[in-house]
Image (cartoon, rainbow, N blue to C red):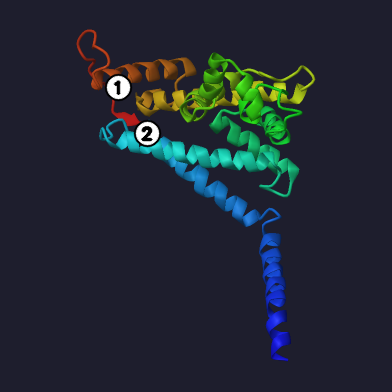
Amino acid sequence: MRSLIRHSAPENRDDSERALSDTHLSRLQHADLAQSLWQIGNSFVPYVLISAILYTVPDLAWWAKPVLWVLAAGFVVRIFIIQHDCGHGSFFKSRRANEVVGWVTSVITMAPYAQWRRHHGLHHANWNNLDRRDSGLDIYSTCLTVDEYADLSALEQRRYRLMRNPAVSLLLLPPIVFLVLYRVPFDSPDSWRKERAGVHLTNLGILSLLLVLAFLLVLGGCYRPRSQLRSSPRRLVSGCFHCSTASRIRYGRARPIGPPPTPRSKAVLI
């Protein structure tokens, strides 16, 4: 009996461990709405707060701005991870929710969601596949066999190694891809109508965000008299322009012209 138990115990232990592993994995095979919303909150909210501090507090200490830049960049990476999971359809159960959140994240990451998703799907399909490695411009999906590399000339071997050097593939190329190439529907055939339209829609979203930030920056330095609170839009824009100029004079970025005007009414901060 002891011999039977001794020989059967490992098999039973393996079965129990396998069952326990399947139980844990089954929880991770489906989207969790609570976890998804929590990830959105702890990624977008800190990023927005840090950005607001950088935009609205001009007198930050010299060391504080680089620290906030690094933190903001880290949260942009988190937001891109959300976009990645939306692209795989795993962040939400709803396909529509994945597309909406994916597009919103693309305005922050500057990677057009629809085009990036299709390119990324091709990347997974062609990763180190010797029969499908020349399907596009994605250098991260291409590879050579040892014999093919040995047949290259010395110059071609140096170029092959250079393009895959971490300093190039992880530091130099990503800014070019995200800031330049993603602004146009590159490596996208004319049949990809949705993806090509998504590039222009993302550019429009980025431009709209920049315009809103610029408008808020102008309003942030505006002091207007009470008599102008109900003025025409033309007068309000003119007042904001003069307030912006006064702010520039205050911080030494412009020279005052003529004597300072004498205020006739009490000013309020808007």
* Residue 40: x %, y % from top left: 56, 47
Nearer mark to the viewer, of 2 and 1: 2
Q: Which of the 4 quarters of the picture holds residue 247?
A: top left
- Rate crowding at label 2 as few (under 14), some (14 to 19) or many (20 or more) other CA atoms within 10 Å: some
Q: Residue furthest bottom?
A: 1
* Residue 48: x %, y % from top left: 47, 39
* Residue 163: x %, y % from top left: 54, 23
Between 70 and 61, the one lying in front of the other is: 70
Residue 72 visible from this viewpoint:
yes
Q: Residue furthest right?
A: 191
Which residue is at 45% across, 23% downward? 214
Between 19 and 245, the one lying in front of the other is: 19
* Quadrant of the frame with the C terminus: top left
Callout 1: SS: helix
Which residue is at 57% across, 41% downward? 81
Residue annotated with mark 2: 54
- Rate crowding at label 1 as few (under 14), some (14 to 19) or many (20 or more) other CA atoms within 10 Å: some
Left/right placement of residue 124 relative to residue 82 reads right
Q: Is residue 20 above or below residue 188?
A: below
